[in-house]
Amino acid sequence: MTYELPPLPYAYNALEPWIDELTMTIHHDKHHAAYVANLNKALENTPEWQNKPLEELLSNLDKLPESIRTAVRNNGGGVYNHNMFWEIMGPALQGSEEELTEKISKLAQNAFNMAGAWVAVVSAFGSLKSMIEQVNNAGMTRFGSGWAWVVMDKDGKLSVMSTANQDNPLSEGLKPILTVDVWEHAYYLRYQNRRADYLKAWWNVVNWEAVAARYKMFKG
Ligand code: MN3
């Protein structure tokens, strides 16, 4: 038994025009697939560490044999981060800039409300707009490759952070609620060097119910 590449939960072109079909195809079928293959390869000779939930591996990197620790950190993180990334996106919103802002605000607030998370969002960030700005800023200031996150600490408090490469907040004892991939492979075909434009557009493909469901799951 090994880790598998889950199919993309929607069509490769479902995030158009904000994220293009070719980017999604290469990102899922090549990049994500490679992390899965390399994770399985890394664990080949340590059967006692196979078949574990990825959460467990990433939360216990210090307990792994040193010979596989870096490979699991990079590739196990790569698998988990992309699984989560696909999960918290969904069919693209369409409309004018004004309409999009209104739709996002409505969808996010509804989903957070239903999950009992809206109070936590407001108390951590003041507003949804401010949360979005903080995530964009974390994505913009992440030098090189990495991810921007909304995370929950052990007391249920939300905050924004970024990680390098394929590092995951679980390795720091934090629960990941929302994430955006800021590796160039996530946006270069359509946006080239314009990471800010990609980040701005990305909010039009967020599946807020999936984000809120993660809050609920970790809150218990
Ligand atoms: Mn990626």
Image: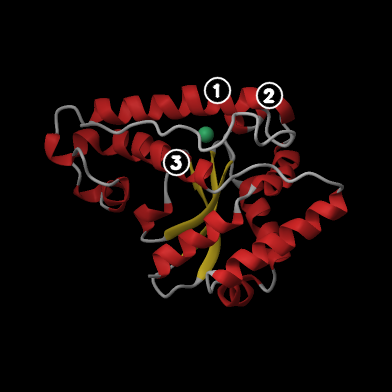
Q: Answer above or below: position of 148 versus 43.
A: below
Tell me the residue that label 2 is attached to: 189
Reading the image, the residue beneath label 3 is: 83
> Percent x, y for residue 130?
70, 65
Amino acid type at image mark 3: Asn
Task: Name the residue type under label 2.
Answer: Leu
Query: Which is nearer the N-term, disc 1 or disc 2?
Result: 1
Point out which mark residue 170 bears: none
For the residues bearing labels 1 and 2, Cβ distance under 8 angstroms: yes
Mark 1 C-beta to ligand 1 under 8 Å: no
Q: State the SS at label 3.
A: helix
Q: Which circle, 2 or 3, is nearer the viewer? A: 3
Q: Assess disc 1: are there few (<14), some (14-19) or many (≥20) residues with their C-alpha within 10 Å of its C-alpha.
A: some
The answer to whether residue 133 is above or below residue 50 is below
Residues at marks 2 and 3, CA–CA distance in whole angstroms: 21 Å
Tell me the amino acid under the disc marked 1: Ile
Residue 166 in the image: x percent, y percent? 44, 40
Task: Identify the disc placed on residue 26.
Answer: 1
